[in-house]
Amino acid sequence: MTLFIAILPVFLLLMVGAAFQHWRFPFDGFWQGVDKLVYWCLFPALLFSKTSVIDFNNPMLFDYGVTLVGAMCVTAVFVYLLAKGIKAPNPTTTSMIQAGIRFNTFITLALAERLYGAEGLVYAALGAAVLIPSVNVFLVVCLVSMHGKPGQSLPALISKELLRNPLILSIALGISLNLLGLTPVLILSDMTEMLSRATLPLVLLAVGAGVRFTAIRSVGMSFWISAVGRFVVFPAVVIGLCFVLGISGLAASVALLFGIVPTATSAYALAKQLGGDAERMAAFITLQTGMSMITVPVSIALAHSWLS
């Protein structure tokens, strides 16, 4: 109950955002503008602010990255094999894979800060720095390979996805300046730190406003396979690798968050752009976000009991 009360504000903000969108408050189209502000300004500022101060001399960081990427790969294989087992068409299969391995970065960082404070937020930013580029490259290769159009250049598409993603660019800049010993950067570091303070509450409202309940329809077994991949396989592999690699304490707890949050809302745009089943993807996002209000506190409680 204590844990549930601690993370309840995160999900209440999601519900408030959904209510604001339903009531068209403060005016129609407002939350689409907030989405752009968060994606292009606030969230890149937060990621730059945190990655620019990470201590890369920590010998555990490599194992931490291996754990997260390993969980992503195992989950992708699991979902793919079961999708083929139910004879899902390729567009549905790629949307199932997205729903299984993508994670909502915004909710992850909000939970990390809420549960574990500033140090937890730094670990979450590090995990995002590892997984965001890895997931994007993996999915572009996957989608193009499974239903790419003739004439599409895979390297060009990957470069395009990476170079136009402000989250990846902000991570790359923060890490580069950090490794070169040029941080904190005069004025820039203070500005991004100020912007980062406004990011998480606003982004949770925006994520809630982006939920589309009308997208839910009969998604059948394809949804349940992707949900098992997201909420069961991914966290199970994270816990297993943490045990094998000797990762414990705060690092293990934060790593687990990447496997129990719902899939990313950006999955819809990639599915639409590269030939996935976009409508089914929208349903996956909405259903997983709703499910996570129950699965997240239960998963964290069980994991804390096991990890302790």
Image (tube, rainbow, N blue to C red):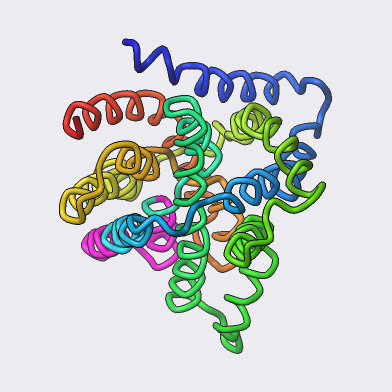
Q: Residue at x 74, y 37 (%)?
A: 195
Q: Is residue 89 magenta?
A: yes
Q: Quadrant of the C terminus?
A: top left
Q: Which residues are magenta?
A: 76-99
Furthest toward the bottom, the residue is 151
Q: Front-most of 142 and 284? A: 142
Rendered-image quadrant of the N terminus:
top left
- Judge whether residue 83 is colored magenta: yes
Q: In the picture, residue 97 is in which quadrant?
A: bottom left
- Position of 159 with respect to 226 (left or right) is right
Q: Nearer the viewer, residue 222 or 253?
A: 253
Residue at the (55%, 39%) spot, across then down: 106
**As displayed, is residue 204 above or below residue 248?**
above
Q: Please give left or right for residue 307 compared with residue 249 in the image.
A: left
198 and 152: which one is in front? 198
Q: Is most of the magenta stretch helix, strand or loop?
A: helix
Which image quadrant for residue 77?
Answer: bottom left
Residue ID at (83%, 24%) = 27
Q: Where 244 falls versus 192 (above or below)?
A: below
Q: Give coordinates of residue 39: x percent, y percent.
A: 69, 47
Q: Where's residue 73, x and y in %?
A: 31, 63
Coordinates of residue 120 in the picture (x, y in percent): 45, 36
Residue 140 at x, y percent in the picture: 51, 70
The picture quadrant where one finds residue 302 is top left
Residue in the foreground of this view, choosing between 25 and 158: 158
Would residue 160 be found to the left or right of residue 245 on screen? right
The residue drawn where x is 65% and y is 30% is 209
Is the residue 183 above or below the residue 11 in the image? below
Total number of numbered discs in the rendering: 0
